[in-house]
Amino acid sequence: MRAESVGPRALIEELFRAALASVEPRSAVRRALGWRDGALLVDGASVPVSGRVAAIAIGKAAARMALGAADVLGDAISDGIILTKAGNLGEGVPRFVGYEAAHPVPDDRGVAATEQVLALARSLRCGDVLLALISGGGSALLEAP
C-alpha cells in the first residue's frame, strides 16, 4: 500500500498490523529455526545433533512457539514440554506435552510442571540438544522452590 493512496489512519493501522505479524510467536520461531543434514539451524548458525532434539517452550507464548518449532523440525523433535499460563495452551502440538499454571503468582501446577522440565533436561546425554523457547511470563511459570 502506498502512503499517497491512503489516509494517515489507514497507513498507521497497516503498519501496526505488519508489526504485530512480524513478532507473532509461531512465525518468529519458524523464521529463526531450520534443519539441514542432521543439524539444527538457529538464526543461520548450525548446531550439530548426533543424538536427540528435546524442546521446552515456557511462557505466555509457549504454545505458539512450540507450534513454530514443530512446523520446522517435525519428527526431529523427540520430546517436548510446553509450560504456559492457564488458558493459553490451545491446540495440541505433536511430540509436546502441555502444562498450564498460574501467572503471575506461581502455584503447585507450575512446580509440578517444572519438575517435568527438569526431568527432561536431566535425561539428555552427550550429542543431544535442548531447544529452549522462552517468552514473557516464563520466570513466574517455571518454579522450583
Image (spheres, rainbow, N blue to C red):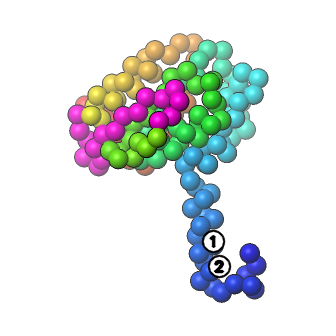
Label 2 secondary element: helix
- Which residues are drawn in magenta? 92-108
The residue depicted at 30 percent of the width and 35 percent of the height is 110
The numbered disc on residue 60 is none
Q: Position of residue 67 (x, y in %)?
A: 55, 39
Inspect the image, locate mark 1, and give the three-letter code of the amino acid beneath it: Leu
**Above or below for 1 versus 39:** below
The residue depicted at 71 percent of the width and 30 percent of the height is 35
Label 1 secondary element: helix
Camera-nearest residue between 91 and 86: 91
The quadrant of the image that shows the C terminus is top left
99 drawn magenta = yes
Camera-nearest residue between 67 and 117: 67
Residue pointed to by mark 1? 15
The numbered disc on residue 11 is 2
User: Are the two marked residues, 2 and 1, in contact with CB atoms closer than 8 angstroms?
Assistant: yes
Inspect the image, locate mark 2, and give the three-letter code of the amino acid beneath it: Leu
Which quadrant of the view contains residue 71? top right
The residue depicted at 59 percent of the width and 18 percent of the height is 52
Which quadrant of the view contains residue 90? top left
Q: Position of residue 1 (x, y in %)?
A: 74, 75
Rounded to the nearest whole Å, what is the CA distance between mark 2 and mark 1? Answer: 6 Å
Q: Position of residue 38 (x, y in %)?
A: 72, 21
The residue depicted at 51 percent of the width and 44 percent of the height is 64
98 drawn magenta = yes
Q: Horizontally, is 74 left or right of 80 in the view?
A: right
Q: Position of residue 26 (x, y in %)?
A: 57, 46
Does residue 42 appear in the picture of this structure? Answer: no
Which quadrant of the view contains residue 102? top left
Q: Horizontally, is 87 left or right of 125 in the view?
A: left
Residue with the most extreme front position: 91
